Image: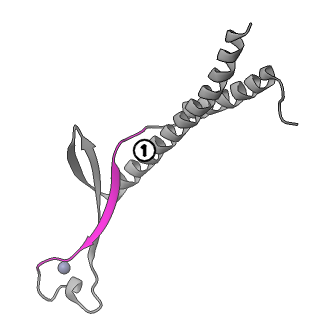
Amino acid sequence: MPPTTTDERLADYETRYRELAAELATIGLIHSGSVTHRYTRCQTPGCKCHADPPQLHGPYYQWTAKTNGKTVTRRLNENEAELYQEWIANDRRLRQLIQQMRQIAAKAAELKLKQAASP
Ligand SMILES: [Zn+2]
């Protein structure tokens, strides 16, 4: 049954809010930016990257982020790329959780303010 009274609804929001906060606490390291990988051709004539079909060099991993309006990049090896990808995914999840918490908090706040306005 869906909660009907204001107190029940508030308790519901509270529970959901605490669950999100608990998940927030389990998130590992976070990092900004994004990781891309690309394949390239070299300048060496007769290299396999110029063959038909071409076997391109790579993948080459790169981390990119904007810091103070400037784009910063860093070349990564595969292990580093894996770490960055994990941290960036954590960062995304963190922002999702905070957004959900904000939404629930806004609904709960509205109910509480209504209660406070008519004691
Ligand atoms: Zn080549």
> Bounds of the magenta span?
30-43
Report whether 26 appears left or right of 52.
right
User: In the rendered image of this protein, does residue 108 appear above or below residue 80?
Assistant: above
- Few, some or many C-alpha atoms within 10 Å of disc 1 (few <14, some 14-19, many ≥20)? many
Ligand 1's quadrant? bottom left
Within the magenta stretch, is there residue 35? yes
Q: Position of residue 114 (x, y in %)?
A: 69, 17
Say whether residue 106 is visible. yes
Q: Position of residue 78 (x, y in %)?
A: 35, 59
Q: Identify the residue position indicated by label 1 in the image.
A: 87
Q: Residue at x 63, y 21 (%)?
A: 109
Instruction: Residue type at mark 1: give it.
Output: Trp
Q: Secondary structure at mark 1?
A: helix
Residue nearest the observer in this picture, 110 or 75: 110
Residue nearest the observer in this picture, 79 or 96: 96
Q: Residue furthest front?
A: 118
Q: Residue furthest top?
A: 119
Report whether 52 appears left or right of 107.
left
Within the magenta stretch, is there residue 8? no
User: In the rendered image of this protein, does residue 72 appear above or below residue 105?
Assistant: below
Q: Residue at x 84, y 28 (%)?
A: 4
Report whether 8 appears left or right of 15.
right
Residue nearest the observer in this picture, 63 or 2: 2
Q: Residue at x 63, y 31 (%)?
A: 104
User: In the rendered image of this protein, does residue 7 appear above or below residue 79?
Assistant: above
Q: How is the image coloured?
A: one colour
Q: Position of residue 23 (x, y in %)?
A: 60, 34
Q: Quadrant of the C terminus?
A: top right
Q: Position of residue 34 (x, y in %)?
A: 35, 51
Q: Residue at x 42, y 44 (%)?
A: 87
